[in-house]
Image (cartoon, helix red, strand yellow):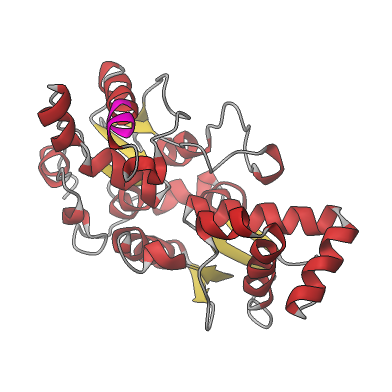
Amino acid sequence: MMKYAYYPGCSLKGTAIDYHASTLALAGRLGIELVELEDWVCCGASPAHQRNPILAAGIANLLLSLSSGVSSQIAVLCAACYHNMKKAEEEMRRDGRHRNEVEALTGIRFDPEVRTRHFLDILDKDLGLAALKEKVVRPLEGLRVACYYGCLLSRPPIIAFDDPEVPEIMERVLRAAGAEPVNWTHRLECCGASHAVPLTDAVLRLVNDILISARDAGAEIVSCACPLCQANLDMRQDEIRKKLGVTHNLPVVYFTQLLGIACGATGEDVKIRKGMVSAEPLLRFKNLL
């Protein structure tokens, strides 16, 4: 059994509990042991690096140190958490002066052997697509999926685990499970992130453009790897209808939910009912639930 330290982060224990639940359900069926870090803290999200870059890197260094005795590799799911931790890790590895400042602030020595890994990368490179395909008991045949990466998962290039400009890793893993990823234009476009609070109208326009692109490409469902992206694309659809006069009814789920179902998990296991736009009717129509 493959074993990794696991950092869920704040969102996966709150608003994105379906991401957390589906990750554990999937990992268990794939023979991947995820050991949650003890006494983990928030990765700092956006405020930390805006306030103090050394402090932000210090938080990441603390989280990396928590994997001691568990694994030299930390599995991360949230795109923002992965982005913050991997960027800090690589900067400490490459810049000795920066690393010294971080260590002086935190009193924690940076361990260059510890690596931050996104779960998509683990599925693709460590488990392998052939092994993943062998675990599929309910192929996602005929399910047309728009794989949405957003901003944080593959940029800047130092954090990328696939081509930062044309990533295809989500398409690869979902295709191994039998899905039909569509080719569309807005897979890397920003959803507006937390600007949904101060700049709601701008975010509605961004989300609307993303959903139109997915729909026009023939997608029946959108697959995400970021809690904030999933929330914006899912919960803004009704507001778009009211303010922009455009009707969408496109389920937005996590890639782990689709893979979990393909590998035998139930809808309840992956909390498929949590979305504002339910994916359940579509998945039942496809005989996947």
Q: Residue at x 50, y 71 (%)?
A: 34
Q: Which residue is drawn at 82% across and 75% down?
A: 104
Up/down of 28 relative to 287, above or below: below
Q: Position of residue 141 (x, y in %)?
A: 28, 34
Judging depth in this view, the residue of 103 and 201 nearest the camera is 201
Give the main secondary structure of the magenta stretch. helix
Q: How many tags in the picture?
A: 0
Judging depth in this view, the residue of 122 and 55 nearest the camera is 55
Q: Which residue is drawn at 52% across and 45% down?
A: 130
Judging depth in this view, the residue of 72 and 203 nearest the camera is 203
Q: Where is residue 232 in the image (x, y as percent from the top left)?
A: 30, 42
Residue 84 among magenta residues = no
Q: Where is residue 281 in the image (x, y as percent from the top left)?
A: 10, 42
- Name the residue furthest right: 96
Up/down of 230 relative to 189, above or below: below
The image quadrant that residue 102 belongs to is bottom right
Up/down of 106 relative to 242, above or below: below
- 49 lies left or right of 222: right
Extent of the magenta region: 201-205
Is any part of residue 19 visible from this angle? yes
Residue 203 among magenta residues = yes
Q: Position of residue 180 (x, y in %)?
A: 34, 29
Q: Which residue is drawn at 64% across and 66% down?
A: 60
- 244 lies left or right of 230: left
Up/down of 278 relative to 146, above or below: below
The image quadrant that residue 122 belongs to is bottom right
Q: In which quarter of the image is the N terminus?
A: bottom right
Is any part of residue 139 visible from this angle? no
- Name the residue furthest top: 216
